Image (spheres, rainbow, N blue to C red):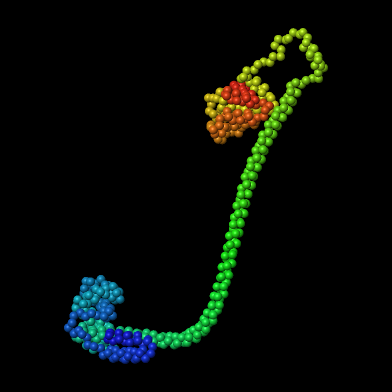
Amino acid sequence: MKDAIISILSAVSLCFSPGVEGIASCDATLDTMSVLESAAERPDQPESSCGAGEPLLPESVRQRVIALASAAMSGIPGDELPTPLRRIAKFTPARRAKLGGAMIAAQLSGNALLRQRLANHAVAEAGDLGEAVLACAPPAASDPVEVAALAYLARPDGWHELLSAATEALRVDSTGAEVTERFRVLEQRLSRAEHERAVARVEADKLRDELARLRDEAASVRDEARSAAKALRDSQAGHKRAAELLAIEKGRAARAVADRDAEIRRLKAKLAEAECVAGAARQTAKDARAVDDARLWLLLETITRASAGLRRELALDPVDRLPADFVADTSADRPEIAGAGKARALSADDPERLDRLLALPQAHLVVDGYNVTKRGFGEMSLEHQRRRLVAGLGGLAAQTQAEVTVVFDGAERVLGLPPSPRGVRVLFSRKGQTADDLIRRLVRAEPEGRPVIVVSSDREVADGVRRHGAYPLVSDALLRRLARA
């Protein structure tokens, strides 16, 4: 039968081919199916005899045997059941069949007494069908699965024939259903194929008409394309000539622009250089004028205040004698007064000398800071030395109204210094420069005629500033003056 089904399927596959061959194959397929149905109505005799051992049950029959045995176990006391089945006997029949099906099947196969006791209960539950199975004469319309399961449990004489007949009926039913389903599918495929062939014929007619129209359009398009291609070639040739001329003009313009940019850059560089030179010259002239103006102002201010001071100091009354009277007096024989007209000489460290110099108009006092502090109070730290000297100079500036500048070496400079008193300028020399060099620069910057007093016990500093018109004094003069204040 399996070979017949295969031949049916092969023949049906030919039915999809068009023409006389496909129709003939369909007819052959229908004839073969008719023969198969006749064979199914006359099942073959089973191969095994009644004396054979445990048969191989179909899965549906096996499941039904387990279900009948599970239901029949409810009528047997638990202590009479085999030990492996006592645990599952407490379950419901459906749960027994699900969880202990393999165990029940094994006991039925090896325990004839248990199988017989379960068969009695199953046959009694089956009623007339059970009696018919025991008589090996089941009704023709009975369920083959139920018949095979009861025959396997009860095992009457000829139960192998009943089991074989039921198995063959199940197989025939399964094969017939499969063939019917396949035939239905094939019919659907044939119907769909016929519909698709009809649609394909209609579409083919439409495509032929469309193809003819497209061919006509393609011919006209080809003619237009040839005309357009000729016009395009002519246009490209003209464009190429224009592009070549444009490239030549662009090259000339680029060279001209490059030359112009280079000239502009050169002129800008010259202009920038000239502006730098002019700016530097203007700044130099401005600085020179500022220095000259400052020096001139100081000199004029010094002369003005000096003349005013002379007027105050001299305070001359109107004279009542003429110069000739003085000449006559000097020619007279008069004894001289001893010591008259001689001024008291002042020492180099006398603070009165410092006071006289500071009393001059626009006097500028320049102090060598560490030279004075280390001589006067060198036991203190440098920070305290600076603070003490700057504070004393602040009081001196307030008393004399003179300009005061104190210079320290910059190598020992400390950040965060307190603010300087009014009238006192505190300077630190730069890196690589000493306080002596800064003092000389300050003296050289002053105009000639302005009284500049430099306080330092350094002989080299004193000689240097003296050459520039300053008045050098030793550190003791300032220390004694500050002590007196």
How many tags in the picture? 0
Which residue is at a point 64% across and 17% down the rendered structure image? 346
Image quadrant where one finds the N terminus: bottom left
Q: Nearer the viewer, residue 94 or 469?
A: 469
User: Which residue, as the protein is rendered here, is positioned at the far right?
Assistant: 320
Within the image, what quadrant is residue 164 found in? bottom left
Measured from the top left, where is residue 323 in percent x and y?
A: 80, 16
Q: Is residue 102 above or below residue 282?
A: below
Image quadrant where one finds the C terminus: top right
Measured from the top left, where is residue 335 in percent x and y?
A: 74, 8
Measured from the top left, where is residue 298 in percent x and y?
A: 69, 30
Q: Is residue 43 left or right of residue 421?
A: left
Q: Is residue 78 left or right of residue 357?
A: left
Which residue is at a point 58% across and 62% down the rendered structure image? 248
Which residue is at a point 68% across and 31% down the rendered structure image? 295
User: Which residue, as the protein is rendered here, is positioned at the far left?
Assistant: 51
Within the image, what quadrant is residue 106 found in? bottom left
Which residue is at a point 60% across and 54% down the rendered structure image? 259
Q: Is residue 338 above or below residue 18?
A: above
* Residue 331 visible in rendering: yes
Measured from the top left, where is residue 181 in percent x and y?
A: 35, 85
